[in-house]
Amino acid sequence: MAKRFQLTKSDIRKELIKCGRDPVYFINNYIRIAHPIKGLIPFNLYDFQEDTIKDFVDHRYNIILKARQLGISTTIAAYVAWLMLFRRGKNVVVVATKLQTAANLVKKTKLAMKSLPDWMMISKIVIDNRNSFKLDNESEVKAISTSGDAGRSEALSLLVIDEAAIIDSLDDLWAGLQPTLSTGGDCIIASTPKGVGNKFHQLYSEAEQGLNDFNPLVLPWDAHPERDQDWYEQEIRKMSRREIAQELECNFNMSGETLLAGEDLARIKKDIKEPIYKTGFDRNLWIWERHDPNKKYFLTADVARGDGQDNSTFLIFNSDNMECVAEYCGRLAIDEFAPLIYETSKEYGFCLTVVENNSIGMSVLDKLRNMNHPNLYWSRKGTHEHIDQYLAEHQKTTAPGFTTTVKTRPLVIAKLEELIRNKVITTHSIRLVGELKTFIWHNGKAQAMRGYNDDLVMACAIACWVRDTALVINQHDVAYKKAMLNSIMKSTQRMDTKIEGMRGYRRGKKHMGMSTKDEGFPFFIG
Protein backbone atom coordinates (compact mmCIF):
# COMPACT_ATOMS: atom_id res chain seq x y z
CA MET A 1 0.00 0.00 0.00
CA ALA A 2 1.36 3.41 -0.95
CA LYS A 3 2.08 5.88 1.81
CA ARG A 4 -0.14 8.97 2.09
CA PHE A 5 1.66 12.17 1.27
CA GLN A 6 2.17 14.35 4.35
CA LEU A 7 3.37 17.93 4.50
CA THR A 8 6.33 18.73 6.65
CA LYS A 9 6.20 21.58 9.15
CA SER A 10 8.29 23.66 6.75
CA ASP A 11 5.87 22.95 3.90
CA ILE A 12 2.88 23.83 6.08
CA ARG A 13 4.50 27.10 7.13
CA LYS A 14 5.24 28.04 3.52
CA GLU A 15 1.73 27.10 2.45
CA LEU A 16 0.14 29.12 5.24
CA ILE A 17 2.23 32.16 4.35
CA LYS A 18 1.29 31.82 0.70
CA CYS A 19 -2.43 31.47 1.50
CA GLY A 20 -2.32 34.40 3.93
CA ARG A 21 -0.85 36.65 1.27
CA ASP A 22 -3.10 35.60 -1.61
CA PRO A 23 -6.81 34.92 -1.05
CA VAL A 24 -7.23 33.77 -4.68
CA TYR A 25 -4.60 31.04 -4.17
CA PHE A 26 -6.17 30.07 -0.84
CA ILE A 27 -9.69 29.76 -2.29
CA ASN A 28 -8.66 27.90 -5.45
CA ASN A 29 -6.63 25.32 -3.56
CA TYR A 30 -8.42 24.79 -0.25
CA ILE A 31 -11.99 26.10 -0.15
CA ARG A 32 -14.82 23.67 -0.83
CA ILE A 33 -18.41 24.62 -1.53
CA ALA A 34 -21.72 22.77 -1.55
CA HIS A 35 -23.00 21.82 -5.00
CA PRO A 36 -26.75 20.94 -5.21
CA ILE A 37 -25.98 17.73 -7.15
CA LYS A 38 -22.30 16.90 -6.70
CA GLY A 39 -22.12 17.66 -2.98
CA LEU A 40 -18.93 19.17 -1.54
CA ILE A 41 -16.61 20.20 -4.38
CA PRO A 42 -13.47 22.38 -4.73
CA PHE A 43 -14.21 26.03 -5.41
CA ASN A 44 -12.35 26.73 -8.66
CA LEU A 45 -12.76 30.44 -9.27
CA TYR A 46 -13.64 31.75 -12.72
CA ASP A 47 -11.59 34.68 -14.02
CA PHE A 48 -14.29 37.23 -13.17
CA GLN A 49 -14.50 35.85 -9.62
CA GLU A 50 -10.73 36.10 -9.23
CA ASP A 51 -10.84 39.71 -10.43
CA THR A 52 -13.60 40.41 -7.90
CA ILE A 53 -11.51 38.98 -5.04
CA LYS A 54 -8.56 41.15 -6.11
CA ASP A 55 -10.83 44.21 -6.06
CA PHE A 56 -11.84 43.33 -2.48
CA VAL A 57 -8.16 43.42 -1.53
CA ASP A 58 -7.27 46.59 -3.49
CA HIS A 59 -10.29 48.75 -2.58
CA ARG A 60 -11.91 49.50 0.76
CA TYR A 61 -15.37 50.07 -0.73
CA ASN A 62 -16.75 47.90 -3.56
CA ILE A 63 -20.21 48.00 -5.10
CA ILE A 64 -21.26 45.20 -7.46
CA LEU A 65 -24.06 45.41 -10.02
CA LYS A 66 -24.61 41.78 -10.95
CA ALA A 67 -26.80 39.27 -12.71
CA ARG A 68 -28.31 36.26 -10.95
CA GLN A 69 -26.51 32.99 -10.25
CA LEU A 70 -22.95 34.15 -10.82
CA GLY A 71 -21.73 32.78 -7.49
CA ILE A 72 -20.93 36.23 -6.10
CA SER A 73 -22.41 35.49 -2.67
CA THR A 74 -20.29 32.32 -2.49
CA THR A 75 -17.25 34.31 -3.61
CA ILE A 76 -17.86 36.86 -0.85
CA ALA A 77 -18.30 34.07 1.71
CA ALA A 78 -14.97 32.50 0.69
CA TYR A 79 -13.26 35.90 0.97
CA VAL A 80 -14.75 36.40 4.45
CA ALA A 81 -13.41 32.96 5.48
CA TRP A 82 -9.91 33.98 4.33
CA LEU A 83 -10.15 37.35 6.10
CA MET A 84 -11.26 35.84 9.41
CA LEU A 85 -8.69 33.02 9.36
CA PHE A 86 -5.61 35.03 8.41
CA ARG A 87 -6.39 38.38 10.06
CA ARG A 88 -6.87 38.73 13.80
CA GLY A 89 -9.80 40.54 15.38
CA LYS A 90 -11.85 41.07 12.23
CA ASN A 91 -15.48 42.04 12.91
CA VAL A 92 -17.67 41.19 9.90
CA VAL A 93 -21.38 42.03 9.64
CA VAL A 94 -23.63 40.71 6.88
CA VAL A 95 -26.90 42.53 6.12
CA ALA A 96 -29.69 41.49 3.78
CA THR A 97 -33.38 42.24 3.34
CA LYS A 98 -34.19 39.11 5.36
CA LEU A 99 -32.24 37.67 8.26
CA GLN A 100 -32.34 34.24 6.61
CA THR A 101 -30.65 35.63 3.48
CA ALA A 102 -27.85 37.15 5.54
CA ALA A 103 -27.58 33.95 7.60
CA ASN A 104 -27.12 31.91 4.40
CA LEU A 105 -23.95 33.83 3.59
CA VAL A 106 -22.67 33.25 7.13
CA LYS A 107 -23.49 29.55 6.71
CA LYS A 108 -21.45 29.41 3.47
CA THR A 109 -18.51 31.02 5.28
CA LYS A 110 -18.72 28.51 8.10
CA LEU A 111 -18.94 25.57 5.67
CA ALA A 112 -15.90 26.84 3.74
CA MET A 113 -13.91 27.04 6.97
CA LYS A 114 -14.99 23.62 8.29
CA SER A 115 -14.01 21.97 5.01
CA LEU A 116 -10.37 23.08 5.37
CA PRO A 117 -7.67 20.55 6.28
CA ASP A 118 -6.89 20.39 9.99
CA TRP A 119 -3.42 21.86 9.60
CA MET A 120 -4.94 24.90 7.81
CA MET A 121 -7.16 25.75 10.79
CA ILE A 122 -4.73 28.05 12.56
CA SER A 123 -7.76 29.45 14.45
CA LYS A 124 -10.56 27.34 15.84
CA ILE A 125 -14.29 28.09 16.02
CA VAL A 126 -15.09 28.81 19.67
CA ILE A 127 -18.64 30.20 19.35
CA ASP A 128 -20.95 28.59 16.82
CA ASN A 129 -24.49 29.94 16.49
CA ARG A 130 -27.04 29.78 13.69
CA ASN A 131 -26.53 33.37 12.57
CA SER A 132 -22.93 33.92 13.71
CA PHE A 133 -19.68 32.28 14.72
CA LYS A 134 -16.39 33.39 16.30
CA LEU A 135 -12.79 32.18 16.11
CA ASP A 136 -10.27 32.08 18.90
CA ASN A 137 -8.27 34.83 17.15
CA GLU A 138 -11.19 37.17 18.02
CA SER A 139 -12.46 37.33 14.42
CA GLU A 140 -16.21 36.94 14.11
CA VAL A 141 -19.04 37.22 11.60
CA LYS A 142 -22.73 37.81 12.27
CA ALA A 143 -25.89 38.16 10.21
CA ILE A 144 -28.34 40.94 10.99
CA SER A 145 -31.65 41.99 9.44
CA THR A 146 -32.39 45.48 8.19
CA SER A 147 -34.71 46.07 11.12
CA GLY A 148 -32.05 45.30 13.70
CA ASP A 149 -29.60 47.80 15.17
CA ALA A 150 -26.76 45.31 15.67
CA GLY A 151 -23.43 46.55 14.43
CA ARG A 152 -24.29 50.23 14.72
CA SER A 153 -22.52 50.70 18.04
CA GLU A 154 -19.30 48.85 17.15
CA ALA A 155 -16.36 49.33 14.80
CA LEU A 156 -16.66 47.07 11.76
CA SER A 157 -13.81 45.53 9.79
CA LEU A 158 -16.08 44.54 6.90
CA LEU A 159 -19.71 45.34 6.14
CA VAL A 160 -21.42 43.14 3.55
CA ILE A 161 -24.82 44.24 2.19
CA ASP A 162 -26.39 41.57 -0.01
CA GLU A 163 -29.24 42.27 -2.48
CA ALA A 164 -29.09 45.93 -1.52
CA ALA A 165 -31.57 47.16 -4.15
CA ILE A 166 -34.37 45.14 -2.52
CA ILE A 167 -33.82 46.73 0.91
CA ASP A 168 -36.44 49.49 1.20
CA SER A 169 -34.75 51.12 4.19
CA LEU A 170 -31.23 51.11 2.73
CA ASP A 171 -31.00 54.90 3.11
CA ASP A 172 -31.51 54.69 6.87
CA LEU A 173 -29.43 51.53 7.15
CA TRP A 174 -26.47 53.06 5.33
CA ALA A 175 -26.73 56.25 7.36
CA GLY A 176 -26.52 54.18 10.56
CA LEU A 177 -23.79 51.74 9.52
CA GLN A 178 -21.46 53.98 7.50
CA PRO A 179 -19.99 55.66 10.61
CA THR A 180 -18.99 52.21 11.94
CA LEU A 181 -16.50 51.96 9.05
CA SER A 182 -14.75 55.21 9.94
CA THR A 183 -11.91 53.39 11.74
CA GLY A 184 -10.77 51.84 8.45
CA GLY A 185 -13.38 49.17 7.79
CA ASP A 186 -14.21 47.86 4.32
CA CYS A 187 -17.60 47.55 2.60
CA ILE A 188 -18.99 45.23 -0.07
CA ILE A 189 -22.43 46.02 -1.52
CA ALA A 190 -23.82 43.59 -4.10
CA SER A 191 -27.19 43.42 -5.82
CA THR A 192 -29.16 42.94 -8.97
CA PRO A 193 -30.80 46.21 -10.07
CA LYS A 194 -34.33 47.17 -9.18
CA GLY A 195 -35.13 50.36 -11.02
CA VAL A 196 -33.65 53.80 -10.56
CA GLY A 197 -33.81 56.28 -7.72
CA ASN A 198 -33.21 53.86 -4.85
CA LYS A 199 -30.12 54.07 -2.64
CA PHE A 200 -28.31 51.24 -4.44
CA HIS A 201 -28.80 52.96 -7.80
CA GLN A 202 -27.65 56.25 -6.30
CA LEU A 203 -24.47 54.76 -4.79
CA TYR A 204 -23.60 52.86 -7.97
CA SER A 205 -24.25 55.85 -10.26
CA GLU A 206 -22.12 58.10 -8.04
CA ALA A 207 -19.37 55.46 -8.04
CA GLU A 208 -19.36 55.42 -11.86
CA GLN A 209 -18.98 59.20 -11.87
CA GLY A 210 -16.26 59.12 -9.22
CA LEU A 211 -18.42 61.02 -6.73
CA ASN A 212 -17.97 58.59 -3.83
CA ASP A 213 -15.37 56.12 -2.53
CA PHE A 214 -16.90 52.97 -4.04
CA ASN A 215 -15.18 50.92 -6.72
CA PRO A 216 -17.96 49.94 -9.22
CA LEU A 217 -18.07 46.43 -10.70
CA VAL A 218 -20.66 45.30 -13.24
CA LEU A 219 -21.20 41.59 -13.89
CA PRO A 220 -23.93 40.86 -16.49
CA TRP A 221 -25.07 37.36 -17.42
CA ASP A 222 -22.31 36.77 -19.99
CA ALA A 223 -19.55 37.37 -17.43
CA HIS A 224 -19.91 33.66 -16.72
CA PRO A 225 -17.75 31.76 -19.26
CA GLU A 226 -20.17 28.83 -19.48
CA ARG A 227 -23.09 30.98 -20.65
CA ASP A 228 -23.64 31.70 -24.34
CA GLN A 229 -26.38 33.13 -26.53
CA ASP A 230 -28.24 29.81 -26.65
CA TRP A 231 -28.34 29.75 -22.85
CA TYR A 232 -29.63 33.35 -22.81
CA GLU A 233 -32.35 32.65 -25.38
CA GLN A 234 -33.55 29.68 -23.37
CA GLU A 235 -33.65 31.64 -20.11
CA ILE A 236 -35.60 34.63 -21.41
CA ARG A 237 -38.44 32.48 -22.74
CA LYS A 238 -39.92 32.23 -19.28
CA MET A 239 -39.18 35.80 -18.14
CA SER A 240 -40.85 39.17 -18.58
CA ARG A 241 -38.96 42.13 -20.04
CA ARG A 242 -38.51 43.62 -16.56
CA GLU A 243 -37.24 40.31 -15.17
CA ILE A 244 -34.72 40.00 -18.01
CA ALA A 245 -33.39 43.48 -17.28
CA GLN A 246 -33.17 42.76 -13.55
CA GLU A 247 -31.96 39.16 -13.45
CA LEU A 248 -29.64 39.09 -16.47
CA GLU A 249 -28.81 42.43 -18.09
CA CYS A 250 -27.95 44.66 -15.10
CA ASN A 251 -30.22 47.35 -16.54
CA PHE A 252 -31.42 49.90 -14.00
CA ASN A 253 -33.91 51.69 -16.29
CA MET A 254 -35.83 48.59 -17.32
CA SER A 255 -35.65 46.62 -14.07
CA GLY A 256 -37.85 48.65 -11.73
CA GLU A 257 -41.56 48.95 -11.00
CA THR A 258 -41.70 52.31 -12.75
CA LEU A 259 -44.94 53.63 -14.23
CA LEU A 260 -43.32 53.70 -17.66
CA ALA A 261 -41.80 50.67 -19.33
CA GLY A 262 -38.04 50.65 -19.62
CA GLU A 263 -38.07 51.05 -23.39
CA ASP A 264 -40.31 54.13 -23.07
CA LEU A 265 -37.95 55.68 -20.53
CA ALA A 266 -35.00 54.95 -22.80
CA ARG A 267 -36.80 56.52 -25.77
CA ILE A 268 -37.83 59.79 -24.11
CA LYS A 269 -34.33 60.12 -22.67
CA LYS A 270 -33.04 60.49 -26.23
CA ASP A 271 -35.13 63.66 -26.68
CA ILE A 272 -33.44 65.49 -23.80
CA LYS A 273 -31.70 68.68 -24.86
CA GLU A 274 -30.65 71.97 -23.33
CA PRO A 275 -33.22 74.81 -23.45
CA ILE A 276 -32.45 77.70 -25.77
CA TYR A 277 -32.39 79.88 -22.66
CA LYS A 278 -33.11 79.80 -18.94
CA THR A 279 -34.85 82.76 -17.42
CA GLY A 280 -36.64 83.97 -14.30
CA PHE A 281 -34.97 85.32 -11.19
CA ASP A 282 -34.03 81.75 -10.19
CA ARG A 283 -33.31 80.69 -13.82
CA ASN A 284 -35.72 77.80 -13.39
CA LEU A 285 -37.97 78.79 -16.31
CA TRP A 286 -36.62 76.80 -19.25
CA ILE A 287 -37.61 77.68 -22.81
CA TRP A 288 -37.18 75.37 -25.80
CA GLU A 289 -39.40 77.21 -28.29
CA ARG A 290 -40.48 80.83 -28.44
CA HIS A 291 -44.08 81.76 -29.06
CA ASP A 292 -45.27 81.21 -32.63
CA PRO A 293 -48.52 83.14 -33.37
CA ASN A 294 -49.52 80.44 -35.84
CA LYS A 295 -49.58 77.76 -33.14
CA LYS A 296 -51.82 77.11 -30.18
CA TYR A 297 -50.49 76.38 -26.70
CA PHE A 298 -51.80 75.50 -23.26
CA LEU A 299 -50.28 75.63 -19.78
CA THR A 300 -50.78 73.19 -16.87
CA ALA A 301 -49.60 73.96 -13.33
CA ASP A 302 -49.12 72.02 -10.09
CA VAL A 303 -48.85 74.28 -7.04
CA ALA A 304 -46.78 73.61 -3.91
CA ARG A 305 -46.65 75.56 -0.66
CA GLY A 306 -43.23 77.01 -1.39
CA ASP A 307 -41.86 76.23 2.08
CA GLY A 308 -41.39 72.45 1.85
CA GLN A 309 -39.63 69.90 -0.31
CA ASP A 310 -42.19 70.02 -3.15
CA ASN A 311 -41.84 72.32 -6.15
CA SER A 312 -44.36 74.53 -7.89
CA THR A 313 -44.31 73.63 -11.55
CA PHE A 314 -45.92 74.38 -14.88
CA LEU A 315 -45.49 73.10 -18.42
CA ILE A 316 -46.45 74.69 -21.72
CA PHE A 317 -47.36 72.38 -24.59
CA ASN A 318 -47.98 72.89 -28.27
CA SER A 319 -51.62 71.81 -28.55
CA ASP A 320 -51.18 70.23 -31.97
CA ASN A 321 -48.18 67.92 -31.50
CA MET A 322 -47.91 67.82 -27.67
CA GLU A 323 -44.32 69.02 -27.63
CA CYS A 324 -43.30 70.70 -24.38
CA VAL A 325 -41.94 74.14 -25.28
CA ALA A 326 -41.45 75.61 -21.79
CA GLU A 327 -41.18 74.44 -18.21
CA TYR A 328 -40.86 75.91 -14.74
CA CYS A 329 -39.82 73.99 -11.62
CA GLY A 330 -38.93 75.86 -8.44
CA ARG A 331 -39.95 76.83 -4.94
CA LEU A 332 -41.78 80.10 -5.23
CA ALA A 333 -44.23 81.62 -2.81
CA ILE A 334 -47.83 81.76 -3.99
CA ASP A 335 -47.80 85.54 -4.50
CA GLU A 336 -44.77 85.10 -6.80
CA PHE A 337 -45.95 82.01 -8.64
CA ALA A 338 -49.26 83.48 -9.86
CA PRO A 339 -47.63 86.49 -11.62
CA LEU A 340 -45.09 84.15 -13.22
CA ILE A 341 -47.91 82.00 -14.63
CA TYR A 342 -49.72 85.11 -15.85
CA GLU A 343 -46.70 86.61 -17.60
CA THR A 344 -45.58 83.32 -19.16
CA SER A 345 -49.05 82.48 -20.47
CA LYS A 346 -49.23 86.02 -21.83
CA GLU A 347 -45.95 85.43 -23.70
CA TYR A 348 -47.65 82.48 -25.38
CA GLY A 349 -50.70 84.42 -26.51
CA PHE A 350 -52.64 84.09 -23.25
CA CYS A 351 -52.83 80.35 -23.83
CA LEU A 352 -55.38 78.21 -21.96
CA THR A 353 -54.10 78.03 -18.37
CA VAL A 354 -54.94 74.97 -16.29
CA VAL A 355 -54.14 75.14 -12.55
CA GLU A 356 -54.86 72.29 -10.17
CA ASN A 357 -57.41 73.71 -7.76
CA ASN A 358 -56.33 72.10 -4.50
CA SER A 359 -56.37 74.35 -1.43
CA ILE A 360 -53.16 76.12 -2.39
CA GLY A 361 -53.91 76.09 -6.10
CA MET A 362 -57.19 77.91 -5.47
CA SER A 363 -55.21 80.82 -4.01
CA VAL A 364 -53.20 81.01 -7.23
CA LEU A 365 -56.42 80.87 -9.27
CA ASP A 366 -57.93 83.70 -7.22
CA LYS A 367 -54.88 85.84 -7.91
CA LEU A 368 -55.02 85.04 -11.63
CA ARG A 369 -58.70 86.00 -11.70
CA ASN A 370 -57.90 89.24 -9.90
CA MET A 371 -55.30 89.90 -12.57
CA ASN A 372 -58.08 89.38 -15.18
CA HIS A 373 -56.46 86.40 -16.88
CA PRO A 374 -58.67 85.94 -19.96
CA ASN A 375 -58.21 82.21 -20.59
CA LEU A 376 -58.43 80.14 -17.40
CA TYR A 377 -59.57 76.52 -17.45
CA TRP A 378 -63.02 75.97 -15.90
CA SER A 379 -64.88 72.71 -15.45
CA ARG A 380 -68.27 71.56 -14.27
CA LYS A 381 -68.25 70.53 -10.59
CA GLY A 382 -68.08 66.79 -10.06
CA THR A 383 -66.82 66.20 -13.59
CA HIS A 384 -63.91 67.18 -15.82
CA GLU A 385 -66.22 68.67 -18.45
CA HIS A 386 -64.48 71.78 -19.75
CA ILE A 387 -66.57 74.98 -19.89
CA ASP A 388 -65.45 78.13 -21.67
CA GLN A 389 -64.54 80.86 -19.21
CA TYR A 390 -67.02 83.45 -20.49
CA LEU A 391 -69.86 80.98 -19.84
CA ALA A 392 -68.54 79.35 -16.69
CA GLU A 393 -68.02 82.54 -14.66
CA HIS A 394 -71.79 83.05 -14.48
CA GLN A 395 -72.75 79.50 -13.51
CA LYS A 396 -72.93 78.13 -9.97
CA THR A 397 -72.23 74.57 -11.12
CA THR A 398 -68.74 75.37 -12.42
CA ALA A 399 -65.36 75.92 -10.76
CA PRO A 400 -62.05 77.33 -11.99
CA GLY A 401 -59.05 75.00 -12.29
CA PHE A 402 -58.54 71.27 -12.56
CA THR A 403 -59.81 69.01 -9.77
CA THR A 404 -57.72 65.97 -8.81
CA THR A 405 -59.39 63.48 -6.47
CA VAL A 406 -58.64 59.97 -5.24
CA LYS A 407 -60.84 58.61 -8.03
CA THR A 408 -59.55 60.79 -10.86
CA ARG A 409 -55.82 60.67 -10.02
CA PRO A 410 -55.33 57.09 -11.35
CA LEU A 411 -57.17 58.04 -14.56
CA VAL A 412 -54.99 61.09 -15.09
CA ILE A 413 -51.79 59.10 -14.48
CA ALA A 414 -53.00 56.32 -16.78
CA LYS A 415 -53.52 58.91 -19.52
CA LEU A 416 -49.92 60.08 -19.05
CA GLU A 417 -48.60 56.53 -19.47
CA GLU A 418 -50.82 55.97 -22.51
CA LEU A 419 -49.70 59.08 -24.37
CA ILE A 420 -46.01 58.48 -23.67
CA ARG A 421 -46.30 54.81 -24.68
CA ASN A 422 -48.01 55.83 -27.92
CA LYS A 423 -45.31 58.44 -28.62
CA VAL A 424 -47.76 61.35 -28.49
CA ILE A 425 -45.69 63.47 -26.07
CA THR A 426 -42.28 65.01 -26.72
CA THR A 427 -40.32 66.40 -23.78
CA HIS A 428 -36.79 67.77 -23.78
CA SER A 429 -36.49 68.26 -20.02
CA ILE A 430 -33.94 66.32 -18.01
CA ARG A 431 -35.89 67.34 -14.90
CA LEU A 432 -39.14 65.75 -16.07
CA VAL A 433 -37.42 62.59 -17.33
CA GLY A 434 -35.61 62.35 -13.99
CA GLU A 435 -38.93 62.43 -12.12
CA LEU A 436 -40.44 59.84 -14.47
CA LYS A 437 -37.54 57.49 -13.70
CA THR A 438 -38.41 57.56 -10.00
CA PHE A 439 -42.21 57.49 -10.43
CA ILE A 440 -43.07 53.94 -9.41
CA TRP A 441 -45.85 51.60 -8.39
CA HIS A 442 -45.86 51.18 -4.62
CA ASN A 443 -48.61 49.18 -2.92
CA GLY A 444 -50.79 49.54 -6.01
CA LYS A 445 -50.39 53.32 -6.19
CA ALA A 446 -48.29 55.28 -8.67
CA GLN A 447 -46.15 57.78 -6.78
CA ALA A 448 -42.66 59.18 -6.43
CA MET A 449 -40.08 57.08 -4.64
CA ARG A 450 -39.31 58.15 -1.09
CA GLY A 451 -37.07 61.19 -1.15
CA TYR A 452 -38.03 62.19 -4.71
CA ASN A 453 -40.58 64.57 -6.22
CA ASP A 454 -43.39 64.10 -8.75
CA ASP A 455 -44.52 67.70 -9.26
CA LEU A 456 -43.53 67.87 -12.93
CA VAL A 457 -45.01 64.41 -13.51
CA MET A 458 -48.40 65.50 -12.16
CA ALA A 459 -48.39 68.71 -14.20
CA CYS A 460 -47.61 66.60 -17.28
CA ALA A 461 -50.34 64.08 -16.39
CA ILE A 462 -52.88 66.89 -16.14
CA ALA A 463 -51.72 68.15 -19.53
CA CYS A 464 -52.30 64.71 -21.04
CA TRP A 465 -55.80 64.53 -19.61
CA VAL A 466 -56.73 68.05 -20.72
CA ARG A 467 -55.36 67.45 -24.19
CA ASP A 468 -57.29 64.20 -24.65
CA THR A 469 -60.54 65.47 -23.13
CA ALA A 470 -61.15 69.21 -23.12
CA LEU A 471 -59.07 70.13 -26.17
CA VAL A 472 -59.81 67.15 -28.38
CA ILE A 473 -63.51 67.03 -27.46
CA ASN A 474 -63.85 70.77 -28.06
CA GLN A 475 -62.19 70.36 -31.44
CA HIS A 476 -64.64 67.58 -32.25
CA ASP A 477 -67.57 69.76 -31.17
CA VAL A 478 -66.37 72.57 -33.42
CA ALA A 479 -65.97 70.12 -36.30
CA TYR A 480 -69.47 68.71 -35.74
CA LYS A 481 -71.00 72.20 -35.67
CA LYS A 482 -69.18 73.16 -38.84
CA ALA A 483 -70.34 69.97 -40.53
CA MET A 484 -73.94 70.63 -39.45
CA LEU A 485 -73.86 74.23 -40.69
CA ASN A 486 -72.31 73.18 -43.96
CA SER A 487 -75.06 70.63 -44.48
CA ILE A 488 -77.82 73.28 -44.30
CA MET A 489 -78.80 74.28 -47.85
CA LYS A 490 -81.12 76.85 -49.37
CA SER A 491 -82.85 75.85 -52.62
CA THR A 492 -84.19 78.45 -55.12
CA GLN A 493 -85.81 75.86 -57.38
CA ARG A 494 -89.60 76.12 -57.61
CA MET A 495 -91.64 72.95 -57.91
CA ASP A 496 -95.05 72.79 -59.63
CA THR A 497 -97.15 69.97 -58.23
CA LYS A 498 -100.38 70.71 -60.16
CA ILE A 499 -102.05 67.87 -62.09
CA GLU A 500 -104.70 67.75 -64.82
CA GLY A 501 -108.01 69.14 -63.69
CA MET A 502 -106.48 71.67 -61.30
CA ARG A 503 -106.52 75.39 -61.95
CA GLY A 504 -103.34 76.67 -63.45
CA TYR A 505 -102.44 73.32 -64.96
CA ARG A 506 -100.72 73.57 -68.31
CA ARG A 507 -100.54 70.53 -70.51
CA GLY A 508 -97.02 69.46 -71.48
CA LYS A 509 -95.35 71.11 -68.47
CA LYS A 510 -93.18 68.88 -66.28
CA HIS A 511 -94.39 68.41 -62.77
CA MET A 512 -92.24 67.18 -59.89
CA GLY A 513 -89.47 66.55 -62.38
CA MET A 514 -91.69 64.28 -64.56
CA SER A 515 -93.84 64.94 -67.62
CA THR A 516 -97.56 63.97 -67.36
CA LYS A 517 -97.22 62.50 -70.83
CA ASP A 518 -94.48 60.20 -69.65
CA GLU A 519 -95.48 56.63 -70.38
CA GLY A 520 -94.25 55.62 -66.99
CA PHE A 521 -96.93 57.67 -65.25
CA PRO A 522 -99.39 55.14 -63.77
CA PHE A 523 -102.65 56.96 -64.53
CA PHE A 524 -104.20 60.10 -66.04
CA ILE A 525 -106.86 62.37 -64.67
CA GLY A 526 -109.23 64.26 -66.94
Image: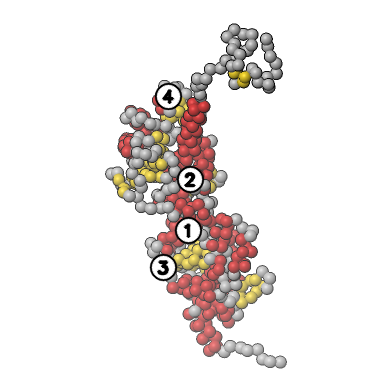
- The residue that mark 2 highlights is 424
Q: Is residue 333 above or below residue 434?
A: above
Give the number of the disc on residue 200.
Answer: 1
Mark closer to the chain start, 2 or 4: 4
Secondary element at tag 1: helix
User: Viewer-proximal residue, 229 or 27?
Assistant: 229
Marks 1 and 3, how far apart at CA? 22 Å
Give the number of the disc on residue 391.
Answer: 4
Q: Quadrant of the N terminus?
A: bottom right
Mark closer to the chain start, 1 or 4: 1
Q: Hey, which residue is sitting farthest left in the picture?
A: 281
User: Which kind of residue does numbered mark 3 sit on?
Assistant: Gly
User: Which kind of residue does numbered mark 2 sit on?
Assistant: Val
What is the crowding at mark 2: few (fewer than 14 residues within 10 Å), some, or many (at least 20)?
few
User: Viewer-proximal residue, 50 or 144?
Assistant: 50
Give the number of the disc on residue 184.
Answer: 3
